[in-house]
Image: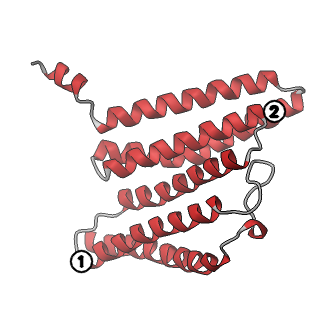
Amino acid sequence: MSEASVTAADPSPLRIGAFMTFATLGFAALIGLIAVFDASSRGSAVGIGAGIAVMIFIVGGTIACGLACLVRRRSELLALGALAASGLAIDLFSLAIWQEIDDETYGKFAAIAFVWTLVGLLMLGLTLAVRAREQLARALYVGAMIASGVAGLIASWLIATAGGPVGLASPVGLETITDESLLRPLAATLVLLSALWFAALAASRLEQR
């Protein structure tokens, strides 16, 4: 069996990630163009186009980090998951703008996808920035990764159990949270995450020197 046949039969994570990126961004671009030309006025067309473009650039950080990790063969499963979450977030956002969707379940699903897009950005960005070879840097890196995951889980649970409607016109607010006991742990986790993230970066740079 030739090398090309093996590659085609067993695609690499980079090929899978690139295909996911092409598919999700292509879908978002198509929906965005339809929404722009279907807008009722020129002003609304500009607002729709700018909104979708800004959202693509926001999730683009996660896409860039995910593809960079796949090229370097680092945290490949995490990178593929982050690419899937970011693609899902932008596609759901584009559809919601085009069809003016304000369904509660749809909005919560889109918000959770966006949360994990941000979590993926934090995890993959740290993975690219840190080479944790020594014990201190490795411990700080693992701590930051765990804190990112915990923050994502808490935020997802708060969104999923929110009492009011969640959508583009009615985002999640403190008044819609039903499980307020998790707000303090979420805040504490975010503080630890920010400190551990930059501490791991500093420890890694110290090791390199």
User: Is 108 positioned to the left or the right of 208 in the image?
Assistant: right
Disc 2 secondary structure class? helix
Q: In this view, does 152 lie to the left or right of 134?
A: right
Give the residue pinned by disc 1: 135
* Residue 46 tag number: 2
Q: Count up the numbered dots.
A: 2
Q: Earlier in the sequence, mark 1 or mark 2?
A: 2
Quadrant (top left, top right, bottom left, bottom right) of the C terminus: bottom left
Residue at 70%, 24% (x, y): give it. Answer: 33
| Along the viewing direction, whichever of 129 and 80 lies nearer the viewer | 80
- How does the figure colour the protein chain or chains? secondary structure
Question: Could you tell me residue 3's position as x and y percent?
Answer: 14, 22
The reply to whether the C-beta atoms of the residues labelled 1 and 2 are less than 8 Å apart is no
Which residue appears at 34% of the width and 70% of the height?
142
Q: Report x, y in % for residue 125.
A: 43, 57
What is the crowding at mark 1: few (fewer than 14 residues within 10 Å), some, or many (at least 20)?
A: few
Taking the spot 48% from the left edge, 60% from the top edge, the residue there is: 122
Q: Which of 161 and 78 is in front in this view?
A: 161
